[in-house]
Image: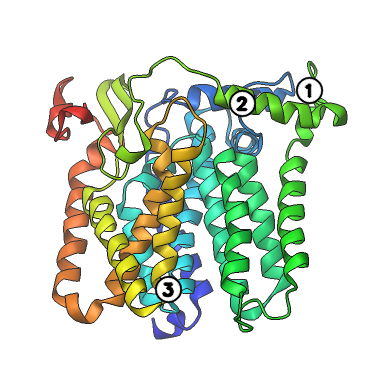
Amino acid sequence: MPTVTRHPAILGLLIALAVWPLFLFRLAVPHMIVFDEVHYVAAARALIALSMPVNIEHPLLAKELIAASMLAFGDTPFGWRFASTIAGAATVAGAFALAQVMTGRVRAGVLAAVLTLLGFTVYIQARIAMLDTFMLAFLIWAIVLLAASMRSGSWTRWTAGAVLLGLATACKWAAAPYVAAAGVAFLVLRRGRADRWPGMHPVLALALLGGVSVAVYFLTFLPAFFYAHDALTLRGLLPFQYEMYQRQTQGLPPHTYQSNWWTWPLLIRPIWYLYEPADGAQRGILLIGNPAVMWGGLVAVAACFAGWVKTGAARLLAPAMLWTFAVGIFAVIPKSLGFYYYYYPASVFVAIAAAVALDEWRGDIRRWVEAYLLLAVALALYFLPVLSAQALAHAGAFSRWTWFASWV
């Protein structure tokens, strides 16, 4: 193990390979469309057939990846969801890499990977064909590469990070604000510090960040130029973006599972992706965060902010700011409805903040770290039947896991 810890890239790959089978196990259950798969599987089918635009309010890349998965494994539940398992494993490894880059400590990275996996949200999103799963996988690795370029001034890492930001935005527009945030962070962190991004001229760095991410984003629309009906054209590419914006900001009727952004960190309104008879039994899939990780992570975010005020340590500010930004953008994004799955990136960033805090104050809380992790594991086992669509005893079995009326 000491040899592996001296090579974080190898350890990150091993983490991804270790968690991937957990996402693959019983992936095809239930053998039916689940929640928003109704939109994205249909869109993937249209891409495979190159028939016509479908689900045009969102960019194409995530649906292209679902389509590629279906081409490889068939138009089956396994085929719909297989690509998501890879994105989920990449996200857990990305949490490891990001915490390790922030702190310079492998221990913090391992804690981040463990808490991310135990946080529930990645496990659920890695087993369903939805856009957010792919968006976060690209986004978290973009942040890792951009952060890693800070010390070395590596144009290669900076450019690769810009590519990944473009790919994340090409999955879902919710990633677009991170491009601007990366530029602002570059200017603020570089000011007066020659050791940060050495040799990278600000104008060139920002031009590369914006130019590459935008170019990559538009390249992902290439299949739409070959639709049999209503094919996209170069002249229509920019107007199409405005049409997407109009559709994303249109007023929508109330939804059973809608919720306000400020409720997501508190776990006030999770979402039942599934709760009905399927494959011969009553089954459920509840998108909810692990209370130990989500609520404990809020304490960690506050502790990181307080620690930064006291010490000025960037390793404490970074995870707290990432979580704050991930939640805060939804306070200003013009969406008529909000849903708990919009919290997905923040649910991983809060797990990273918890890992950084546990590592930072390890000397003071040594005796409690194991107890905290055991609590997170216990809750994971407790909720597992309604995270993995296991057969339930009867139609009213949901009451075992719905602690509050708003969880029903």
Residue drawn at 54 percent across, 41 percent down: 174
Q: Name the residue under label 1.
A: 227
Can residue 172 be seen in this snapshot?
Answer: no
Q: Is residue 328 left or right of residue 232?
A: left
- In-front residue for pair 5/303: 303
* Element on which disc 3 rests: helix
Q: What kind of residue is marked 1?
A: Tyr
Residue drawn at 62 percent across, 53 percent down: 180
Residue 377 placement (x, y as % from top left): 21, 56
Residue drawn at 45 percent across, 23 percent down: 33
Residue 293 placement (x, y as % from top left): 26, 54
Q: Which mark is residue 387?
A: none
* Element on which disc 1 rests: loop
Q: What kind of residue is marked 3?
A: Arg
Q: Quadrant of residue 342?
A: top left
Mark 1 Cα shell of 10 Å, populated few (<14), some (14-19), many (≥20)? some
From this view, report whether residue 216 is shown above or below residue 78.
Answer: below
Tally of marks: 3
Q: In 3D space, how far apart are the residues under numbered discs 1 and 3 (Cα atoms)?
A: 48 Å
Q: Do the residues labelled 1 and 3 touch (CB within 8 Å)?
A: no
- In-front residue for pair 168/42: 168
Locate the N terminus by quadrant.
bottom left
Q: In this view, does 127 lie to the left or right of 371?
A: right
Locate the C terminus by quadrant.
top left
Q: In 3D space, how far apart are the residues under numbered discs 3 and 2 (Cα atoms)?
A: 37 Å
Q: Mark 3 points at which residue?
A: 315
Query: Which numbered disc, 3 or 2, marks the residue that appears first in the sequence?
Result: 2
Q: Residue 57 carries which label?
A: 2
